[in-house]
Image (cartoon, rainbow, N blue to C red):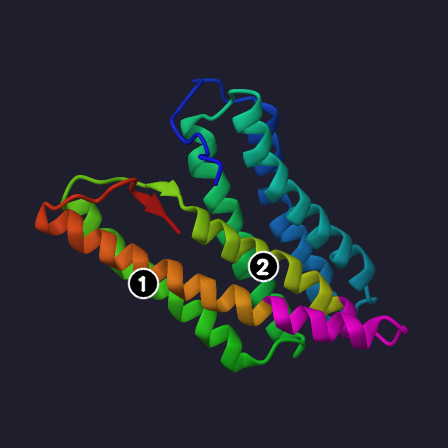
Amino acid sequence: MEVQETRVQTDRVLTIPNLLSMGRLVGVPLFLWLILWPVFDGPNNDGWALLILMLSGISDYLDGKLARRWGQISRVGQLLDPLADRLFVLSTLVGLTWREILPWWLTVILLAREVFIAGLLPILNRHGYGPLQVSFLGKAATFNLMYAFPLLLLGAGDSWIARPAEIVSWAFIWWGATLYWWAAILYAVQVRQIVRGGPASSPSTV
């Protein structure tokens, strides 16, 4: 398996990968506005919301790939990328659940994972660790969810492709949710190693 470079290679802030992550952050409130507008008797903008989701998924793939290829891995990027991922996942959960496209119990499962991780962060801080690097497993989980949400939104429509999109979306959702929690459990194990002073090889966030 190819070993991916994760060390900081540049101090530049305005790099193409960082701009992609910033664009993803800007897309968060825009997506929420588009997806929730029908709830407040506004016009249906699901097509535009779907486009924002798709662009977010493409951006999520490109920013890390380009950063490694062009030697533009930066500390800012290591902070922006997981932040943009989390905010987009959370905003999508809120929007799709509010619209009753995503069942509330699945939202609880995914949000509980975030609460679980948040409960471990103060432990890391007490031992002098700040935000850690993105793990491959956590990124894979996010990719699955990023693919699942646009398909789920597409499946909520009435076009001929809605039913196939819904079926495929649920396959991605279950696999993504499983990886999401698997990464969280491995993260907890790593935190335990750090607290005990043992070897926590390749520290990574999720």
**Residue 173 visible (yes or no):** yes
Q: Measured from the top left, where is residue 47 in percent x and y?
A: 82, 60
Compared to residue 4, the image places residue 74 above or below, namely above
Closer to the N terminus: mark 2 or mark 1?
A: 2
Identify which amino acid the numbered label 1 is placed on.
Ile
* Total marks in image: 2
Identify which amino acid the numbered label 2 is placed on.
Asn
Magenta highlight on residue 164: yes
**Distance from the alpha carbon under mark 2 to that under mark 1:** 18 Å
Residue that badge 2 annotates: 144
Q: Measured from the top left, where is residue 166 in percent x and y?
A: 73, 74
Residue at image point 49% right, 53% down? 86
Left or right: 112 as drawn, with respect to 162: left
Q: Place residue 20 in its image quadrant.
A: top right
**Residue 94 visible (yes or no):** no
Left or right: 179 as drawn, with respect to 128: right
Left or right: 193 as drawn, with respect to 21: left
Residue that badge 1 annotates: 185
Residue at image point 46% right, 75% down? 108
The segment highlighted magenta reads 154-172
The residue nearer to you, when weighing 15 against 182, is 182
The residue nearer to you, when weighing 82 against 169, is 169
Q: Place residue 186 in its image quadrant.
A: bottom left
Q: Place residue 44 in its image quadrant.
A: bottom right
Magenta highlight on residue 22: no
